[in-house]
């Protein structure tokens, strides 16, 4: 929602049987893994869809809270000089990978944790007032 308020186009994913996120401009609908409650990230070519939606450019920012199942997809969806923000492990920890994978697009990656962005009460208050 905050990205949309700043004028960015937001692309999201959701399972077929879930409600699409209202904050998204485009939603890529995935199948659900049979007998499970989570999305099958191989049921749709997410990279191809992102490239179609962005006119072949990719995403300037990829925010990935899933982890293991989506890390490779996230890197492939990046735009030139894009940044991949990996913050979750819903499908398991992101496996080790070579930073050379970022070279073709001069891309960036980060693994932030909240405590480093609100280390003091003053910093928490300052960030909260920005929202």
Image (tube, rainbow, N blue to C red):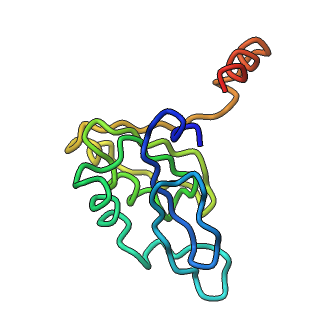
Residue 20 vertical placement versus 34 (above, below): above
Q: Quadrant of the N terminus?
A: top right
Residue 19 vertical placement versus 86 (above, below): below
Along the line of sight, the residue nearer the viewer: 83 or 69: 83
Q: Is residue 72 left or right of residue 126?
A: left
Q: Quadrant of residue 47?
A: bottom left
Q: What percent of the width, then of the height, locates residue 113?
A: 63, 34
Q: Residue at x 61, y 55 (%)?
A: 89
Q: Quadrant of the C terminus?
A: top right
Q: Which residue ends up furthest to the bottom in the rendered image?
A: 34
Q: What percent of the width, then of the height, locates residue 122?
A: 76, 11
Q: What percent of the width, then of the height, locates residue 23?
A: 57, 51
Q: Residue at x 52, y 54 (%)?
A: 24
Q: Is residue 11 left or right of residue 22?
A: left
Q: Is residue 24 left or right of residue 114?
A: left
Along the line of sight, the residue nearer the viewer: 105 or 53: 53
Q: Residue at x 57, y 34 (%)?
A: 112
Q: Which residue ends up furthest to the right in the rendered image?
A: 121
Q: Quadrant of residue 39?
A: bottom right
Q: How many marks?
A: 0
Q: What percent of the width, then of the height, locates residue 52?
A: 27, 62
């Amino acid at each position: 929602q905050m990205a949309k308020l700043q004028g960015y186009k937001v692309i999201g994913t959701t399972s077929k049987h879930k409600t699409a996120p209202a904050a998204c401009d485009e939603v890529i609908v995935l199948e659900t893994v049979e007998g499970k409650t989570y999305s099958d990230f191989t049921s749709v070519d997410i990279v191809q869809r992102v490239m179609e939606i962005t006119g072949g450019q990719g995403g300037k920012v990829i925010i990935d809270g899933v982890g293991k199942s989506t890390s490779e997809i996230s890197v492939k969806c990046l735009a030139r000089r894009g940044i991949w923000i990996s913050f979750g492990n819903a499908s398991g920890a992101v496996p080790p990978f070579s930073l050379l994978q970022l070279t073709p697009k001069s891309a960036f990656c980060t693994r932030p944790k909240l405590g480093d962005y609100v280390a003091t009460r003053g910093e928490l208050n300052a960030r909260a007032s920005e929202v």
